[in-house]
Image (cartoon, grey):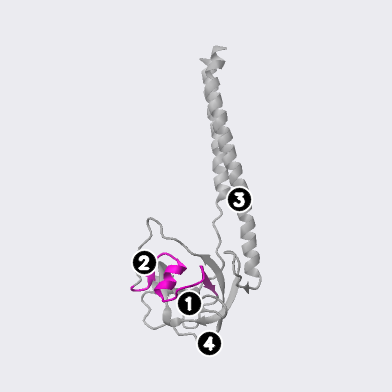
Amino acid sequence: MTRLRRLLWPGVMTAFMLVVLLGLGTWQVQRLYWKLGILAQIAQAEAAPPVPLPAVPSPFAKVQVTGRLRDDLSATFGADVRDTPAGPVLGTQLIEPLERAGGEPLLVDRGWVPDTLTRPIAPTEGEVTLQGYVHPGDTPGWFSAPDSPATRQFYTLDPAVIGKTLGLPRVAPFILIAMGPTPPTGYPVPAEHLPRPPNNHLSYAITWYGLAVALVVIFVVWSRKALSE
């Protein structure tokens, strides 16, 4: 009886931790199937034709919108190194407003351009129809690089702040990330596909379940040793 009492509190703590680990593993399995559903929706949307841009768009839908690009009011966002035939090149995203009939101007991320680009981007004339997906506005974090309104270089994708710097008092509260083929001039390079959130939940579930198994094994080994003393 004295030996069994020695197992009481370690057994209670082991059972508690086992429930926690199994719960975390099961939660990750649920997240896995939830994420697979989102990825299936994205694949379906990517295979389907784009839908007209709604008032409240989904971030995982392929949309299209028609308007006139304001090439004279461009800005840049972020910094991104990409591999080119000449080697790795630092670049940024080209942001331009799209004036729409019956709607607020919409900021468009037309794609990546290198910092070393020597020739200007060819201007667009007349109305254009763009395809892409919507990116909600961001807010700066503790470690966000400061924006430079004087040079129109931004590191936080905040439509209201960028629009105000470009002289637009009101803009849509989201950004359109343009998709499509690279233009004949080479730049800007638009996005190739809809965003795909990472899906690492299976490995997380295996980790939690593996820790649960290890906990049981350790407790069994310890219990045998404690009972034999």
Q: Nearer the viewer, residue 116 or 214?
A: 116
> To which residue does mark 3 refer?
32
> Residue lying farthest bottom?
125
Q: Amino acid at mark 4?
A: Gly
> To which residue does mark 1 refer?
97
How packed mark 2 is, by other alpha carbons closer than 10 Å (few <14, some 14-19, many 20 or more), is some
Mark 2 or mark 1, earlier in chain = 1
Mark 4 or mark 2, earlier in chain = 4
The x, y position of residue 225, in whole percent, is 52, 20
Q: Image height check: is 141 above or below 210? A: below
Q: Amino acid at mark 1?
A: Pro
The part of the image, by quadrant, that contains residue 148 is bottom left
Q: Image height check: is 229 above or below 109? A: above
The residue range painted magenta reads 150-179
Mark 1 or mark 4, earlier in chain = 1
The part of the image, by quadrant, that contains residue 139 is bottom left
Residue 48 on the magenta span: no
Q: Amino acid at mark 3?
A: Leu
Mark 2 element type: loop
Q: Nearer the viewer, mark 3 or mark 4?
A: 4
